[in-house]
Every structure is written in structure tokens, then in C-alpha cells.
Image (tube, rainbow, N blue to C red):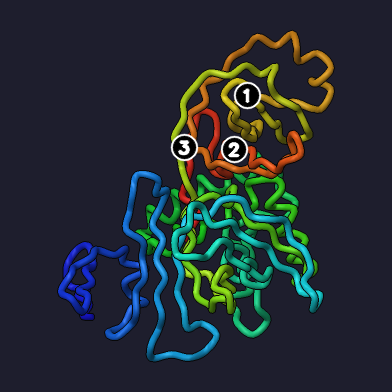
Amino acid sequence: MSISRQHEPPACVLANRTKILLPRLLARHIDVGDEIALPIPNDDAVGTEICITKTSFSGIERFLYQAPIGYVTQPKADKRNQLFVSAEVRHGRLGISSVFLPCEVLRDYFYRLPQCNDQAARTTFYDLLCIPASASPAELRVAFKLRTLELNAAGAPRGEQAALERAFNIVGRPELRAAYDLLLADPEAPAVFPYGSFGSLLVAGERSRDGQTFFARRILAFSPDLRRRRFHATLRKCEFYDGSALCRDVRRKLEFWLDPAVLHTVWDPTWNKWKHLLATKMDVDGTFVPSGKYRKRHGQWELVTVPASRPASSALGHGNCPCG
């Protein structure tokens, strides 16, 4: 096998001279002599599944695995009392049905906690946004827009912009912000898989003896499934809290968070007592990711999916890529 990285997109030439095109991120992890296994695509394929065996490496990251994943469990402890989550492989055809992800792997990739031995790594998401940890959702959004303008004006590298987007997409969503704050206080606290978990996951690690489980030691990339939606919704469908509101659209099976800066108004929980009188409609323009959980119906477990807005998406606004 030979690999060409000189052209767009990167091409991989197999031993039988068959050429396949690979994503740049995946191609840079492949070397001459590596073994590549991938199923022949069919009409039921939901994403790219590929398993690479590093022939020149025999450690715990000998394998690379990319697959579309669906439901990810909540953190739980294994027999050694170490926290982990399990990601379900969607329509896998290489024999792997789930990806085992220790919580420390999630923390390293998604949350990137400050390290004491590196000044740059000690920067928290709040530091990147130039706000205190007590900032309200409205203050978070304003700070994100201001910092984006500053980085664009300064011609900052794409990496700095991606770091800012990651920071906002974590602390801009209430449940992820709570998990991040908990991790800042206790680095050993459980870490949840963000962004609805549905998407394409690329990890390095090893396969189980029976080949059905992939034990990830490092996340190389995650790209969530995205869908742009624009529609009208009424304020009466919102549940109002201090500084934020959760809007659920049962008919469209959507939910998303709002903050006062988006609607240019201020509310409090007392609005829930008379929200049925609100006839005001808002124009929602955002990017959504699917999320889901298993429910037992008629004696069987079924996966129920619900599209939810990405942390950076909003009414009357646009989202930003949460992965980087």
C-alpha cells in the first residue's frame, strides 16, 4: 500500500492498485504497510466504517477505528471502579458493536481540563471567553461574539477560533456547563459525552478478544450529525428559568435553549404561571443535532431519538462547529 498526501483529497493506493479517497484527518494516521478493513457500502450504510491495523506498532493504540455512533450511555463504573461510557456503533459491518470510552478519554478530548505544569494548558474555557465562571447565558453569548470579532480582526489562526467555539459550545449549554464546572472542581468526576453523541467517531485503541468491542485509548476526532432547521415557534412552548429558557416543540420533536440576549427581553420563572397567554412567535434558525435514550415499550427496549439544538445554535442566530 502507498499513500499520497500531495493532492486533495488524500488518496490511498492498496496493494492491488485499488485507489480509495480518505479524509485528511484519517489519512495522516496511516503509514505504508498498514492493514485497512472496510465494508462494501450499500443502501443501508449510515456513515463510513473503517478499521486500520498499525503493523509497525504493537502497543495499546495498535488499531484505529472510525464508525458512525448512536446512543452513548451515561457514565458508570467498571470492575476496577473506573468510570466509562459505551457508544453504540450504528449498522456496523466489521463485527464491532460498541466503543468503550473511559471518562478520562472524554475529559482529554472534549473538556481539556487545565494542567498545572503548562501555563497555556491552565487556561479554562471561561478564560478563553474572557468572562468569570459566574457569567449568565446572555453574558456568555455577548462575550463569544466579541471575542470572535476580536480574533477575526487580529487575523488569528483557525486553531484559536476553534478553541473559542469549543469553549462556548461547552459552557453555553446548561448540562455541559454543569459537567465542566464539576470537572474543574474535581478532575475525577464523571464526564458525559456531549453534542447528542450521534455522529462519526475516530478513535485509537484495541479490539476485544471476541472482536465485538473496541477499547478506545484516545479520541482523534468526533463530528456530530448536523441538520439545519428554520421554523416559527411560540413562546408559550418554553419553560422559563432565571437567565435561560428551554423550548420544546413536540410536533417537530425539537428542543433548544434560549437566553435573554437572543430575544432582547428579560424573564423569570414566574412567566411559567401565565405563559399560556403568550401568543408571540419567534423565528428559529439554527443547527440541530440528534440525541436519544432507550425506553422500554411492550417489554422491549427501543431507542427514541429527539433532535436538540447545538449549544451554539439559537433563535435568530447561527451556530458554530462544536468539534475541533
- As measured in the structure, the alpha-carbon distance from the residue carrying label 3 to the one carrying label 2 is 15 Å
Residue type, mark 3 in image? His
Question: Would you place residue 270 above or below residue 139 in this image?
Answer: above
Quarter the N terminus occupies? bottom left
Image height of 253 relative to 304, above or below? above
Give the residue drawn at x 54%, y 43%: 312
Disc on res. 46: none
Residue 166 quadrant: bottom right
- Of the image marks 1 and 2, the number of the one nearer the N terminus: 1
Q: Determine whether label 3 and label 1 are within 8 Å by CB.
A: no
Q: Residue sitting at 20 percent across and 79 percent down? A: 15
- Specify whether 169 is left or right of 223: right
* Viewer-nearest of discs 3 and 1: 1
For the residues labelled 1 and 2, the Cα–Cα distance comes to 10 Å
Q: Residues within 10 Å of mark 3 (few under 14, many from 20)?
A: few
Report the number of discs: 3
Q: Position of residue 303 (x, y in %)?
A: 64, 42
Residue for point 45% across, 53% down = 150
Q: Position of residue 97 (x, y in %)?
A: 56, 61
Q: Circle 3 sits on which residue? A: 318
Residue of label 1? 249
**CB-based contact (under 8 Å), mark 1 and mark 2:** no
The residue to which callout 2 is attached is: 308
Marked residue nearer the N-terminal end (3 or 1): 1
Q: In the rendering, at what x and y percent does residue 9 appear?
A: 22, 62
Q: Secondary structure at mark 2?
A: strand
| 17 sits to left or right of 163 | left
Q: Which residue is drawn at the image coordinates 34% and 74% (left, top)? A: 36
**Kind of residue indicated by mark 1:** Asp
Q: Quadrant of residue 3?
A: bottom left
